[in-house]
Image: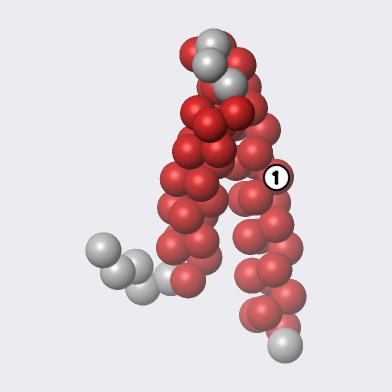
Amino acid sequence: MIFKSHMISMLVFALVVSVMLAFIRHSDLRQVRRYALRLFLYMAGGVVVISWLMHFL
């Protein structure tokens, strides 16, 4: 799957990685959801900031 936007690719990657890490770290489904959401938001924030910096460089 190829996206035209690098930012969308990074957001999809962040989603997949956050879900996988949450399943590895926790066994309870509620904890998995909360941890995956928190990781995704951290990574998505990083993607937005880095994309914004790359746009102006």
SS under mark 1: helix
Q: How does the figure colour the protein chain or chains?
A: secondary structure
Residue at image mark 1: 42
Q: Residue at (45%, 45%) from the top-left corner?
A: 16
41 vs 14, left or right, is right
| Residue lying furthest left | 1
Q: Residue at (72%, 83%) from the top-left corner?
A: 56
In this orientation, does residue 11 appear?
A: yes
Q: Residue at (69%, 51%) from the top-left corner?
A: 45
Which quarter of the image is occupied by the N terminus? bottom left
34 vs 4: above or below: above
Q: Amino acid at mark 1?
A: Tyr
Q: Residues within 10 Å of mark 1 (few under 14, many from 20)?
A: few
Which quarter of the image is occupied by the C terminus? bottom right
Q: How far from the left and from the top, in percent, is residue 31? A: 60, 16
48 vs 14: above or below: below
Q: How far from the left and from the top, in percent, is residue 12? A: 44, 52
In this orientation, does residue 15 appear?
A: no
35 vs 11: above or below: above
| Residue lying furthest bottom | 57
Nearer to us in this view, 7 or 40? 40
Nearer to us in this view, 20 or 12? 20
